[in-house]
Amino acid sequence: MTESPWFRRWFGEDYLHLYPHRDQEEAEDAVALLLARVPLQEDSSVLDLACGPGRHLQALASRGIHAFGLDLSFPLLRKATQAAPRCPLVRGDMRTLPFRDDTFHLVTSFFTSFGYFDTEGEDRDVLAEIRRILRPGGHLLLDYLNAEWVRSTLTPRDSREVGGREVVQVRRLVEGGRAVEKEIVIQDAEGLGTKNFRERVRLYEAQELEALMADQGLEPLERLGDYHGGPTAPDAPRVIVLARAG
């Protein structure tokens, strides 16, 4: 029997328990950065791809923007309903988006919601789907980790207590540094056993990301290194690429 992909198992109730209060201020900064680059009209249609528990949807809604959210996880979508009750939510897989061609003026992919799949071809499929649902001249904002920074600052192991449960995280580079994996071991609250989860993200360089976008008809316009608009650099935490649909 084939094991379910890691992202189907991990982004559920245990994920929410481990990260109960992701930084809303960080989400506000990311949305402010976006809107400084892509002014939206009242009738603009926006999709937050892999919206998770709705931090960025909440930030968009607080600015009067009517955005849709899409995610594969039922628990995260339930949380997003609470965070952004006026935003329509859809469950779906980003490789086959359930929207018509030329639907959105803007697609956002915040907080490293890209590079999850086993093959580069599947990541290309995601970008092709984004291009398909974007209107000509529409924009994509892809907020991704800085692969160079991840490699240089990787913490092999850490542990902490969350809600009375010990959580151990073990990280390693794989595929010759082309991907990073994290194993998460959560001790049962009663000490009766453990739960094991895994994360895996492909480490694309900034130039590789832009080349993938260009191949799918998404023209890179600007590259930034943090949520305050700083430049990309080896010690910058993010690679944020703004692209336009040709």
Image (cartoon, rainbow, N blue to C red):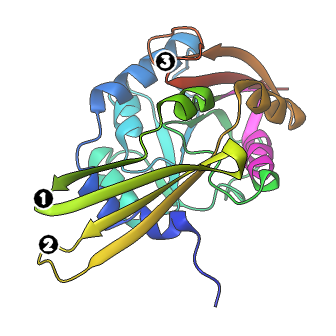
Residue under the image location 36 percent in, 54 percent down: 169
Crowdedness near tag 2: few (<14), some (14–19) or many (≥20) residues, C-alpha within 10 Å: few
Which residue is label 2 attached to? 189
Percent position of residue 201, x then y: 59, 49
The amino acid type found where label 2 is placed reads Ala
Residue at 14 percent of width and 77 percent of height: 191
Q: Quadrant of the C terminus?
A: top right
Q: Residue under circle 1? A: 163
Q: Tell me which amino acid carries mark 3.
A: Asp
From this viewpoint, is residue 178 visible?
no
Mark 2 touches mark 1? (CB < 8 Å): yes
Q: Would you say residue 17 is visible in this rendering?
A: yes
| Structural distance between the alpha carbons of marks 2 and 3 | 37 Å
In the picture shown, does residue 184 fall above or below 225? below
Disc number for residue 226: 3
Q: Residue furthest bottom?
A: 1
